[in-house]
Amino acid sequence: MKNLISINRKTKETDISLKLKVAGTQQIAIETGIGFFDHMLQQLAFHSGWDLQIKVKGDLQVDDHHVVEDTAICLGDAIGQYWRNAESIGRYGQSLLPMDETLVLVAVDVSGRGLYRGDLNFNREFLGALSTEMIVHFFKTFAAKAEITLHIKPMDFENNHHLAEACFKSTARALKQALASNNLESSTKGQL
């Protein structure tokens, strides 16, 4: 794959192989060992238009923390490499996404300043085998490692599955805008 970014991370807790092509054709293969997390990452890749391959072996006998956190580190690192090497990007992106009764607003600034702000107040502890607190942790870690500003604001929700899925889909659509080439300067400073 042209413009392919490969990330490998091996610790005592996880062994991760990730391949990302931002301007892809939605070729997606994800295996983290956590079904619901795979589903969310598939949504992120599909709605961003990425090619994304992720293979994770992790200490799921402990819990889901290390797999989710280290996957966010790898994906954030790949996105950071992409935008820092791109000739030009749109920099900003936003998406207001409905999913049945759920409505989520996401805004992204590819700024070089890693920051997450959000109000994800799930009222279930788990979605499948994924603890809902790890969804927030994923976005925080991803934003920090990618050095982007990421705001996620649920406007309304009743169903926790819909809330999680709308967050990943809306983030994908905002990132697609922000990372798209636009042949313009991204900052009055001349660089991000």
Image (tube, helix red, strand yellow):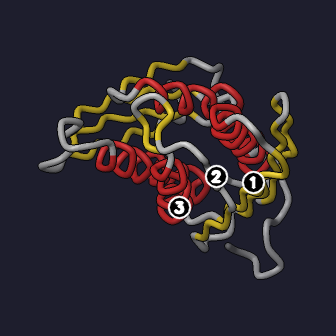
Q: Quadrant of residue 143?
A: bottom right
Label 1: which residue?
89
Q: Horizontally, is 94 left or right of 33 in the view?
A: right
Residue 171 position (above or below residue 22) = below
Q: Amino acid at mark 2?
A: Ala
Label 2: which residue?
86
Q: Quadrant of residue 192?
A: bottom right
Q: Secondary structure at mark 2?
A: loop
| Mark pair 2, 3: CA separation | 23 Å
* Residue at x-position 39% and y-position 45%: 68
Q: Are marks 2 and 3 in contact (CB under 8 Å)?
A: no
Q: Residues within 10 Å of mark 3 (few under 14, many from 20)?
A: many
Label 3: which residue?
140
* Residue at x-position 39% and y-position 38%: 6
The percent coordinates of residue 69 (x first, y second) are 38, 51
Q: Residues within 10 Å of mark 1 (few under 14, many from 20)?
A: some
